[in-house]
Amino acid sequence: MHLADFMRVRRDLVEAALDQYLPPANEPPGKLHEAMRYSVLAPGKRLRPILVIASAEAAGGSPHHVMPTACALECIHAFSLIHDDMPCMDDDDTRRGRPTSHIVFGEAIALLAGDALLAFAFELVASNAARLTGDVGSVSEASQRVVEAMRLIARASGTWGMVGGQVADMEAEGHDVSPEALRYIHTHKTGALLEASCVVGAMLVGGDQPTIERLKRYGGHLGLAFQIADDILDVVGDEKLIGKPVGSDESRNKATYPRLFGIAESRQRAARAAEMAVEALEGLDERADPLRALAKYVVERDL
Amino acid sequence: MHLADFMRVRRDLVEAALDQYLPPANEPPGKLHEAMRYSVLAPGKRLRPILVIASAEAAGGSPHHVMPTACALECIHAFSLIHDDMPCMDDDDTRRGRPTSHIVFGEAIALLAGDALLAFAFELVASNAARLTGDVGSVSEASQRVVEAMRLIARASGTWGMVGGQVADMEAEGHDVSPEALRYIHTHKTGALLEASCVVGAMLVGGDQPTIERLKRYGGHLGLAFQIADDILDVVGDEKLIGKPVGSDESRNKATYPRLFGIAESRQRAARAAEMAVEALEGLDERADPLRALAKYVVERDL
């Protein structure tokens, strides 16, 4: 199993599906659709959709079964980046070397494009039921799983997850934060959606409760590993690779692992979190290998 | 049947449920929860939740069956008002005599409170399945209806509905608009969510297809009547009653019915839309009477 091949194939599938699902730019309101497409189709790792797909595969399903939900997670991620970049938030003019949404389309359209993407994500999840019926479940099972997926994704996106973490992150700026506060920020701001990606992937295709539990623990540890790695990259990374100026967290006085623990201990903590992610998958067969490889990859990206 | 009594009872139920469902202000992030509660619990007509409930009752259900979804519609409405009022949109400092969210909590929290309310709304809809099971359907039926309700509400909130209408409205500012363009704005910006409220209310409690179709047509006409009435009130209304300065649409060069057709013809069109809403309910029994009364009320509010 070559992780790079595994990821490339799924990334291509996800990008083709996103392009197909997203409202066309030649349908009104065209400027809004252009803005939605601009942010979602920007180059990216597609980590969340790949986690949905890889988890579905680890639980015995295929990419086809979960594609609308995988794409929904990417839309939610894009929505959060658009709003995060706005002048009243981080006020960033560029992201990954491209001008941010409000620079290209103006603040009002950027705000509304983010809103529309969040609503669109739930439309996608609702549309996922048809993909499951017959193949990996009855109509009744498919609907029940979609309702539960919707609940988990909504929770992971809002105040109990991503948005809650953003608020805590914002409030921590310029203050000393405790390790507990930092953990709260990280598990909510990025961790919740990564964990939800793993859980819903396995759940939608009918994974049993122990499998879902394993993927939930995996997602939790992976999210932490990912976030620590991101914090480290912000200090030591290559600007092109991370898509934002090196040191931008520091200059904003953001709460980060390197700031609290130093680089060396942060690296150890990231490696340990990745190990725990792999351990959480014990008992799953080789179909979970891409997830195992992904955990290592997350902490080995040029740290 | 006294409409005022009918509405007061349901408004009280909705407000008690909203207060119970919304995240408590004493749980972190408290400032975000405070902002969510500030906007949702602000005095209001609760038109959308009352439409959900009245439609459920017209189709043989009770308020209890649809309360989470009714409250979700109010959260989506509140989210749209918060973002609409922001400096990059309408830049309003007050709404219904109270300072707007970004004035009280700052722009960043206002933005995130809107986001969190939209996510929270879908969590509420997902939680509605349990209310239906046993009483008005099997687990399987309940889940299938909730999935369809989520799809409709998501569609009515995003680019195919409310957000799309907001973009069209914004783009029309300062331009001459055709009656067709104005209709597009109105059916999307406010109509879509009002129509969805009626449809999901009847659908969730197991209303049959003809009943759902009737309520869909009712909701469409009601939405138009409501919007024309709102446009008229903006010109001739009492500032206290409408909660914004009289003439504020005119001063913004907003596309409105009075601007296109004059007051007298706008009144006729509103009355005609209300009549068509009532006609759409033909064949439904007296449990639809509150909806009939509501259509008349909408165009008779001090026009």
Image (spheres, coloured by chain):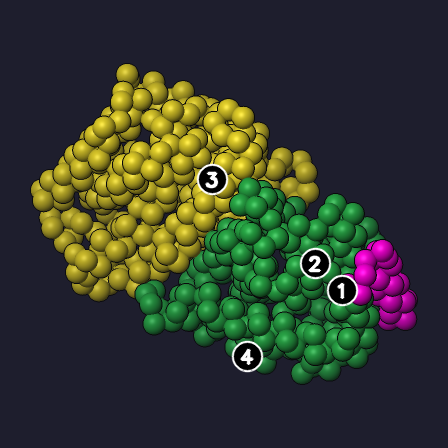
Chain colours: A green, B yellow
If the image is split into quadrants, where does the C terminus of chain A sit? bottom right
- Could you tell which of marks 1 and 2 lies nearer the N-terminus? 2
Classify residue A237 by image quadrant: bottom right
Q: Which residue is mark 3?
A: B145
Q: Residue at x 72, y 78 (%)?
A: A4
* Separation of marks 3 and 2 at Cα, in angstroms: 27 Å
Residue B24 lies left or right of residue B90; in this view the side is right
The chain letter for the residue carrying disc 4 is A
If the image is split into quadrants, where does the N terminus of chain A sit? bottom right
Q: Which residue is mark 1?
A: A287
Residue A263 part of the magenta segment: yes
Three-letter code, disc 4: Arg
The chain letter for the residue carrying disc 2 is A
- The label nearer to you, 1 versus 4, is 1
Label 1 close to label 2 by CB (< 8 Å): yes
Residue A56 lies left or right of residue B187; in this view the side is right
Q: Residue at x 59, y 75 (%)?
A: A12
Eyeballing the image, is A5 above or below B265?
Answer: below
Mark 1, other Cα within 10 Å: few <14 / some 14–19 / many ≥20: some
The chain letter for the residue carrying disc 1 is A
Three-letter code, disc 2: Gly
* Tag shown at residue B107: none
- The label nearer to you, 4 versus 2, is 2
Label 3 close to label 2 by CB (< 8 Å): no
Q: Which residue is mark 4?
A: A98
Q: Which residue is mark 2?
A: A60
Eyeballing the image, is A239 above or below B111?
Answer: below
In x, y percent, where is residue A168? Answer: 68, 52
In x, y percent, where is residue A37? Answer: 47, 70
